[in-house]
Structure formats: structure tokens, C-alpha cells
Amino acid sequence: TDINIQEKSHFIKDERSTTDYFAAARSHEVNFTYSGGATAGNYQTSVSVTQMGKVKSGGQFTGTVIMTLHDIGLNHFTNYATLFQNKGMEPLLQNFTVFHVDYPCMQTNYNGSSSRQWDRNLVYPSFDEFANSMIPTILEYFHLRSVIFIGTGVGSNIATRFALKNPDYCVGLISFNPIFYAIGWKEWFDYKSFSVSNDKLREQLMDYLFSSHELANTS
């Protein structure tokens, strides 16, 4: 289905949709197996997938779907609710099935309650394991073969890893703030203090908070 988008001064207007798409969304729990840095198939956990948008007759998804991957410390709602509840996104939701992925134990329910805690006896999946185990399992679970990925931060990294290895499944990749290297204290501080315009003040704060060894360490 063609979607006609007229050129405006802003791509998306700051106007909230009257339809609460997240309240009407369906939640799925998908189990996947990953190596945990050891023998393949050594660990098993589950990922939460929230489905919204168009569903064809008979419950079929659209031929090409959209899948979002959130940043670290967030979840599908805190990362993407503002975007997908915007009125400018209604044509997309009316023409595509959308799947929002929450990494294990990072889901916050729509009513605000927290998800379960991570089992400390398990090793948390790496970026590669999310890309090579989690995403393929989700695609197989929902029988998906054509995906447009939207990733933010860590999610962008994971989506890019998958797309590079599986170009036949990825027909589009929208990347926000991709992270592709180890972030050190300096980068973290620069991000947190970007609103401070006085460069000398930022330099003094850096010297006060961190030693030269800490600033040089990116691990």
C-alpha cells in the first residue's frame, strides 16, 4: 500500500493521536536460546514482544513489518511511545504491523508495574547473541521475512549486526544514535553535560570528578 506523505516544515507535527495504540497492543512472550559465552544452547530466556498496527483479515501480518529495538535502560514504551503516539505516525500504523521488542527483564508494563528480575545464575545475552539468537527466533515465531528495523542506541547496534548478516530479511534500517564502540567516562560526561555551554567549566568538572587514568579507560 502506498503512503503519501506531503512535505512539511517538520516531518512529524507535535500532535498526539486520539487513539491509544499502546493500550490496545497485544503482548507476546518469546523464548530463545543463546550461548552465554559458552557452549551453544547453554542458556534460555524470554523476550517480550508488543504487537500493534495493522492486522489483515484472518489475523495475518502485513508483508513487510516494522520492528523496534530500544536503548539500554529503557523499554519499548519509554523509548517509542512519544513517537508512535504522534498523530503523524497514524499512516504507518494503519499500513504496517509493528513489533516492539523488550530485552529480557527490561519490560515495564503499560500500567507502570515493573517486569520480573533477571536470574543472577544466568549470563545476560551479548549484542551478538541478541542479533544472532533473539531476532531470528522472533522472526521464526511470527513467520516474518521482510522487516524494517528502527533501533536506538544499543538497539541500533543490534539491528545493524543482524542486518549485515541477514540482508535478505532486512528491507530497511532506521538508526538513532548508534553505539559502535566502548563508551568511556569522557564520552558519558560529554553526553550528560551537553547543555553546559561553558567549556572551561566542563573541563574543571571533568578534572574534579575523574582521574586521568579513568578518563583514558574506555572499558
Image (tube, grey):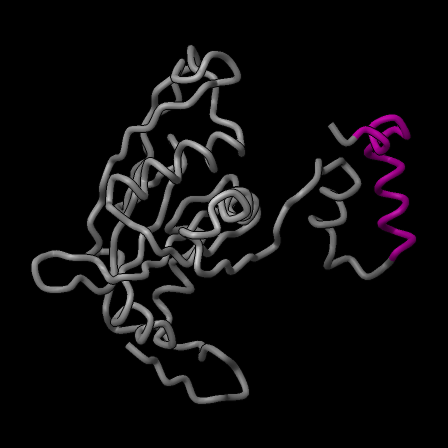
Q: Position of residue 199 (x, y in %)?
A: 88, 56
Q: Nearer the viewer, residue 4 or 72?
A: 4
Quick check: 138 above or below 35?
A: below
Q: Which quarter of the figure is the C terminus placed in?
A: top right
Residue in the picture at 42% in, 64% down: 83
Q: Tell whether 22 sits left or right of 172.
A: left
- The number of numbered discs placed on residues in the rendered structure image is 0
29 lies above or below 10: above
Image coords of residue 31 (percent x, y): 28, 29
Q: Position of residue 91 (x, y in %)?
A: 31, 76
Q: Residue at x 53, y 34 (%)?
A: 127
Closest to the observer, 110 or 84: 84
Give the quarter of the figure containing the N terminus.
bottom left
Magenta span of residues? 199-217
**Relative to 104, residue 174 above or below:** below
Q: Residue at x 89, y 37 (%)?
A: 207
Task: Looking at this view, name the residue that lies furthest to the left.
Answer: 58
Residue at the image point whose x is 38% and y is 31% from the top = 104
